[in-house]
Image (cartoon, grey):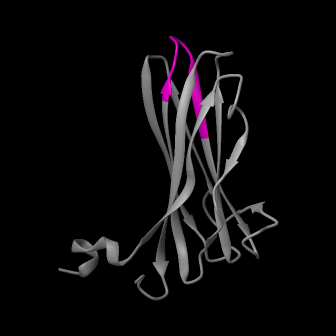
Amino acid sequence: MHPSMTNIGAYISARLGTPPFLATAGGTGDNTATFGVGIDRTGFQSCVLVGIVDATLAAAETVTLTSIVEDAVAVGGPWAAYVPPEGAATATVVVADGATETGIAEVDIDLHAARQFIRQSLTVVHSAGATDTSRQGGTIVLGGAVELPA
């Protein structure tokens, strides 16, 4: 059996995409992009971009989480939304209607045309005016290594 079947950790490297943060409908963190730290992707040709949301919602209300990847030449930017040669670089999930709801947004991204540094951007939008709250954060799992990660 090939090692990738029994030891996937030897082929990927998980990084913090966007630190967890709180958002309140119509207030702090709502409808505002929150950025992760710059990640040097040298030696990696792809990634999985993951955004996670845990929300407390009133009946018939929703929260939408959108996760994108940005790239830059230097860790300090300037940053721009990365557009891969094929496929998407954006993942969106909508959770709706209930007490406590969770959702995950995930997209596989070809990074071979990206600049050296990447970061995640998360935007959460609540449909309610002021009562709903959510916690969200993200991760980037680098893969397609030129050399296996240490």
Q: Residue furthest bottom?
A: 147
Q: How many marks?
A: 0
Q: Residue furthest right?
A: 78
- Towards the viewer: 81 or 13: 13
- Tell me if residue 31 comes above or below residue 129 in the rendering: below
- Tell me if residue 121 comes above or below residue 79 in the rendering: above
Residue at image point 58% right, 28% down: 63
Q: Is residue 84 magenta?
A: no
Tell me the quarter of the image containing the C terminus: bottom left
Residue 121 lies left or right of residue 133; in this view the side is right
Residue at image point 31% right, 72% down: 8
Residue 54 percent coordinates (x, y): 47, 33
Tell me the quarter of the image containing the N terminus: bottom left
* Magenta segment boundaries in residue numbering: 55-65
Residue at image point 29% right, 76% down: 4
Residue 26 percent coordinates (x, y): 71, 22
Q: Is residue 61 magenta?
A: yes
Residue 125 percent coordinates (x, y): 66, 31
Residue 3 percent coordinates (x, y): 24, 80
Q: Residue furthest top?
A: 59
- Tell me if residue 39 comes above or below residue 57 in the rendering: below
- Tell me if residue 9 comes above or below residue 49 in the rendering: below
